[in-house]
Image: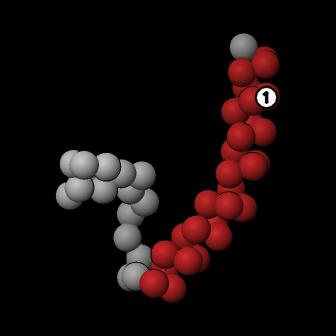
């Protein structure tokens, strides 16, 4: 369990700066919207 927790913490630290950068880019292009990993409007993707 300790190893899994350490991996989760490391993943969070690695994803946070990139996630914030992506949010800033999305906000600059479009109005603020909830983060959606996959667009439900495109079933092909």
**Is the residue 41 above or below the residue 22 in the image?**
above
Residue at the spot 45% in from the left edge and 84% down from the top edge: 29
How packed mark 1 is, by other alpha carbons closer than 10 Å (few <14, some 14-19, many 20 or more), is: few
**Is the residue 2 above or below the residue 15 in the image?**
above
**Is the residue 5 above or below the residue 25 in the image?**
above
Work out which residue is located at the far bottom of the displayed protein and give it. 28
Colour scheme of this structure image? secondary structure
From the viewer's perspective, tell me whether residue 37 is left or right of residue 8. left
User: Number of numbered discs present?
Assistant: 1
What residue does disc 1 label?
A: 6
Percent coordinates x, y for residue 3 in the rendering: 79, 19
Percent coordinates x, y for residue 15 in the rendering: 68, 51
From the viewer's perspective, tell me whether residue 34 is left or right of residue 2. left
Residue at the spot 49% in from the left edge and 80% down from the top edge: 27
Res 7 → quadrant = top right
Foreground of the two, 45 or 41: 45
Residue at the spot 61% in from the left edge and 60% down from the top edge: 19
Image quadrant occupied by the N terminus: top right
**Is the residue 45 above or below the residue 18 in the image?**
above
Q: Secondary structure at mark 1?
A: helix
């Amino acid at each position: 369990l300790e190893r899994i927790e350490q991996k989760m913490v490391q993943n969070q630290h690695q994803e946070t700066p990139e996630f914030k950068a992506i949010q800033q880019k999305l906000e600059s292009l479009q109005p603020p919207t909830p983060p959606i990993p996959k667009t439900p409007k495109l079933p092909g993707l």
